[in-house]
Image (cartoon, coloured by chain):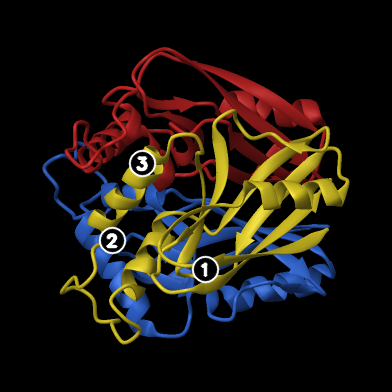
Chain colours: A yellow, B blue, C red
Amino acid sequence: MIKRINVSVSSQGLYDITAQVKQVVETSEITQGLCTLYIQHTSASLLIQENYDPSAKYDLEQWLNRLVPENDPLYTHTIEGPDDMPAHIKSALTTSSLSIPVENGQMLLGTWQGIFLWEHRYGHQNRTVIVSTLS
Amino acid sequence: MIKRINVSVSSQGLYDITAQVKQVVETSEITQGLCTLYIQHTSASLLIQENYDPSAKYDLEQWLNRLVPENDPLYTHTIEGPDDMPAHIKSALTTSSLSIPVENGQMLLGTWQGIFLWEHRYGHQNRTVIVSTLS
Amino acid sequence: MIKRINVSVSSQGLYDITAQVKQVVETSEITQGLCTLYIQHTSASLLIQENYDPSAKYDLEQWLNRLVPENDPLYTHTIEGPDDMPAHIKSALTTSSLSIPVENGQMLLGTWQGIFLWEHRYGHQNRTVIVSTLS
């Protein structure tokens, strides 16, 4: 089964999509198998991370912004704005697809794990994450 | 179904393998499911990235080369040449497997997404990417 | 089929889990399909890397420790110890899930490829990797 999750983002940052993915898995009625997420963009990515303490998410974002700054004189791809090339690099360093096992109809996430869409650009965007379930 | 894609590379860089993967998916005759790519090497990796503007690919390569330079005094693994240890690190920072959903017999790539083999070494190499389709 | 692999780790580093995953694939009796690994933690990750020369693993660990040092003044998430925030960042830069094709009952790993759990914290930990096989 294939379902699309639409995520409306307003700026850079980690957006928790765990509840939306859970709902898709429940609707799919698979009891055991695999749930695979795929993001259809190259300036946003997917991440499994701690969902408990907001300071961990904050530091993760700040750290990556420092590693991949805007206005780096190395960039030649600048026509789409100062946040565009850093967004492509950040996507390359994280991931476009993730697979999570399903048992008894539930994703086997660890106790502190959440599923996040990591938006790397500033503006309002509508992002699409495709959820596939296989058993 | 499992098929091997052979990619002959001549130097470092991003090689677009989207057309070859598409052909495997079409040959597999699955209508809905998952297409998973796996690269059998540890000094080349897989990447979903923008396929439109060559400057984005160029900057991505330059940026990673600067982050993971050759001849870093930290390296002790140097007997296979100055490009070998950087290649292992670059592979670790990107990915060895990728899963893309399939619907109506077509991979659900985003409008500007291409599938790339990222070669991290200099010389001529024959690389193997394994494509598995499941429905 | 879903099986859990328990990995007891004693400190930071790359732990080769190839033999344990192989055993699960053999027990599953699938002849052709996909083996997917998922790690239930956010301060340890999964990696396909060279399994032959220990110096490559050593350099990989040293390099990542230098890129993501402890006690970075940027960190605000510090209550769980100096190795905690670097561990989350290192997990984000590597991966939480990996899929490997299976043919004739064997994973199609490249000649020099091993499957590793990369522990990013110092202390003794019990880590769980979930192996799902689909055909």
Q: Residues within 10 Å of mark 2 (few under 14, many from 20)?
A: some
Q: Please tell me in which quadrant of the rendered image residue C68 appears.
A: top left
Instruction: In the rendered structure, find residue C125 and report the number of the disc placed on it.
Output: none
Location of residue C115 in the rendering, given as x and y in whole percent from the top left corner = 52, 35
**How packed is label 3: few (under 14 Cα within 10 Å), some, or many (20 or more)?**
many
Residue at label 1? B7
- As helix, strand or loop, the secondary structure at mark 2 comes to helix
The kind of secondary structure element at disc 1 is strand
**At 79% from the left edge and 41% from the top edge, which residue is drawn?**
A33
Label number found at residue B64: 2
What is the number of the mark on residue C89? Answer: 3
Q: Is residue B88 visible?
A: no
Badge 1 crowding class, 10 Å Cα cut-off, few under 14, some 14 to 19, many 20 or more, is: some
Left or right of B52 on screen, residue B37? right
Across and down, in percent, residue B61 comes to: 31, 68
Q: Is residue B74 above or below residue B132?
A: above
Instruction: Please state which of residues A52 and C62 is positioned toward the viewer in this rendering.
Output: A52
